[in-house]
Amino acid sequence: MPSRVYATCHIGDGAFEVLRAHGYEVEVYPQSDPPPKTLILEKVRTGIDGLITTLRDPIDAEVFEAGKGTLKVVAQLAVGFDNISRADANRYGIPFTNTADVLTEATAEFAFFIMGAAARKLWPSERLVRENRWGAWHPYLPMLGDEVTGKTVAIIGTGRIGLAMIKKCAGLDMNILCFDPAFQNTQYIEGIQEVMDLRHRHGIQKRATTIRYGVLAEVLAAADFVSVHVPLLREGESPTPTYHLFNETTLRQMKPTAYLINTSRGPVVDETALALALRERWIAGAALDVFEQEPLPTDSPLRDPAIEDRCRIFHHFASGTKETRLDVDPDIGMAGRCVQALRDVLEANYGGDFTKMPYVVNKE
Ligand code: GLV
Ligand code: GLV
């Protein structure tokens, strides 16, 4: 009997063709809005073998219970997996997978670009033109931007995406400060080593750029740009939670001329505190691709017209390139990696040993 797979959203025809070509029966939720939880449960209860999910689908004990005895894998189309209860997956013995690596460069370049867009006032500039307020050229002193080249950037979280962001910032001869909440003692040293290796590989040491780790308050106080690249970890999920890592206290530690860039997860930033920080100008601006609640509610404090020119907002789109989202090669695209990860489990590749499967997250 062919394996049956349910996908909670369309991830590209190519990926589903790969599955069908290997004998899978694939059903896809046809709408772009997420399927209701009741529908996911219903589908899982029909005895599907694999479930393809995205970051908007809550995957918890109810789902694993519904799939007891039949569901064998949850394959998430994202690197982040805070929507999946790891504890429940482990309790039910279900492996879940993610699409790390393939979206690293796309996400980092997006962070880099929106950092520049915020600092160089691209939106106010475009709006001036669109609203026919562009008079004869003059120095436009009231709307000048902040130069990025040679400034100091704080990289908060130095996993794959944080390191890729460092490379891009080094291209602008930026000084680089790092803070990683997950690093303690020996990991801290390894993290520094990894950054040093990166520096060497990319010839960064020949440039003006310096890279070093520091404690959060020190790093924030020195940075002109603060770019967040940590996973969302709530209280109790990790000894170093990242929920509201950016709050009234830490936002006040930033320079009034500094910008906050977030392409990680919305709840890492307390948005009420951030809106206040922008209104009262504790910081100069923010560029955000992720939000505490997505889509961003109509009454979000971040939509306050008073802060509009200082607050760039995007629709959780950092990995959104054709290459990264669609490619069916598991070393290039999220779609390819997602279906390969699912197949590894369902086809018992690697001798059926989850701990050896490269894309399984909960190897424990
Ligand atoms: C997107 O946010 C992802 O985690 O891949
Ligand atoms: C963020 O993606 C991290 O791995 O720190």
Image (cartoon, rainbow, N blue to C red):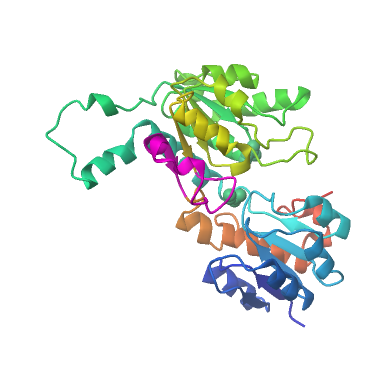
Visible residue check, residue 265: no
Q: Is residue 299 magenta?
A: yes
Q: Residue at x 61, y 30 (%)?
A: 247
Please state the horizontal and vertical placement of residue 224, each as a whole percent of the image.
47, 22
Residue located 77% across and 78% down the image:
46
Along the line of sight, the residue nearer the viewer: 110 or 224: 224
Horizontally, residue 296 falls left or right of residue 142, namely right
In the image, the segment drawn in magenta is: 289-314
Asked if the magenta segment contains residue 23, the reply would be no
Please, is residue 8 above or below residue 148 in the view?
Answer: below
| Closer to the camera in the image, 284 or 359 | 284
The percent position of residue 26, horizontal first and vertical second, equals 65, 76
Q: Which residue shows up at 86% across the image and 60% down it?
A: 92
Q: Is residue 122 left or right of residue 128?
A: right
- The percent position of residue 306, horizontal first and vertical second, equals 39, 36
Q: Quadrant of residue 238?
A: top right
Number of dots carrying numbers:
0
Q: Is residue 270 left or right of residue 316?
A: right
Residue 323 in view: yes
Q: Is residue 185 or residue 66 the one in the foreground?
A: 66
